[in-house]
Image (tube, rainbow, N blue to C red):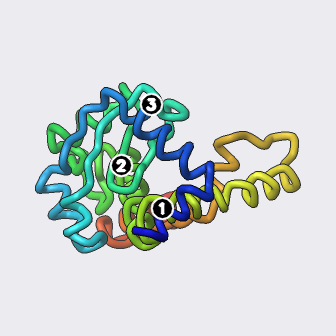
Amino acid sequence: MIGDIITIVHNPLVQLYMVYFETIVGSGAEMYELPEEVKDKLKLYFPPTLLERVRYGSSHHTSTENTAMTDCTDIYFPAGNGIVKLLKNNQIFTRVPDSKSPCSYLYWGKLHWLIHELYHTLQCVEEGGRPNYATRWFGELPVATIEKLITSPRTVSMNKIHDSMFMEERAESYADEVLYERLCNCTMVDNECQ
């Protein structure tokens, strides 16, 4: 607790992060628990105690319409993107009717996105909580920015910087691993589940 206070006091970005989530992103967001079926299907890939604490909702204040924002155990999806409705109606694991594919999830992209964001909740726990998680995230940001400015100065964008951060790459990799190799029980070859 004392370490958290010291981290917050000495890092204005962490202060800004916390205020931003508390007063803007989370403002007016109705939050929900993960459905039991979702927790049951994902308990092999995430600690069940963590899945019990995760809340999700939608916000009009995420950075882009295609970017969710995770604040430790609170996941905010962009308002109107459909994933909150799929989760509330317990439809995220819906399969394509009559498909022979082992990876025939109708809402594959949304399911992948959920797993990616859930990995951020795990990262937060592994980092030791909210202040440490924010400190690590903001610590990676300058490195990713400089890397993208050097390697692709003409096409650099906020999304490319965000996606090249180690924490983001790891979340994306874990979502691929869980969805393809574990839930679908396949290997990806030329973007096809084999």
Tag 2 secondary structure: helix
Looking at the picture, tell me which residue is in the foreground, 179 or 34: 34
Quarter of the image for the C terminus: give it: bottom left
Residue farthest toward the left in the current orientation of the protein: 36
Quadrant of res 44:
bottom left
Reply above or below: 44 against 36.
below
- The amino acid beneath tag 2 is Trp
**Disc 1 versus disc 2: nearer the observer:** 1
Residue 24 tag number? 3
Residue 108 tag number? 2
Residue 111 falls left or right of residue 123: left
Task: Quote the CA–CA distance across marks 2 and 3.
Answer: 30 Å
Residue 55 locus on image (x, y percent) = 26, 48
Crowdedness of circle 1 by 10 Å Cα count: few (<14), some, many (20+)?
Answer: few
**Disc 3 versus disc 1: nearer the observer:** 1
Asked whether residue 190 is in view, the answer is: no
Reply above or below: 125 against 34.
below
**Disc 2 versus disc 3: nearer the observer:** 3
Tag 1 secondary structure: helix
Q: Residue at x 44, y 69 (%)?
A: 2
Residue 9 locus on image (x, y percent) = 56, 56
Crowdedness of circle 2 by 10 Å Cα count: few (<14), some, many (20+)?
Answer: some
Looking at the picture, tell me which residue is in the foreground, 89 or 52: 52
Q: Which residue, given by chain and number where applicable, does mark 1 sit on? A: 5
Crowdedness of circle 3 by 10 Å Cα count: few (<14), some, many (20+)?
Answer: some
Tag 3 secondary structure: helix
Reply above or below: 23 against 12.
above
Q: Are marks 1 and 2 in contact (CB under 8 Å)?
A: no
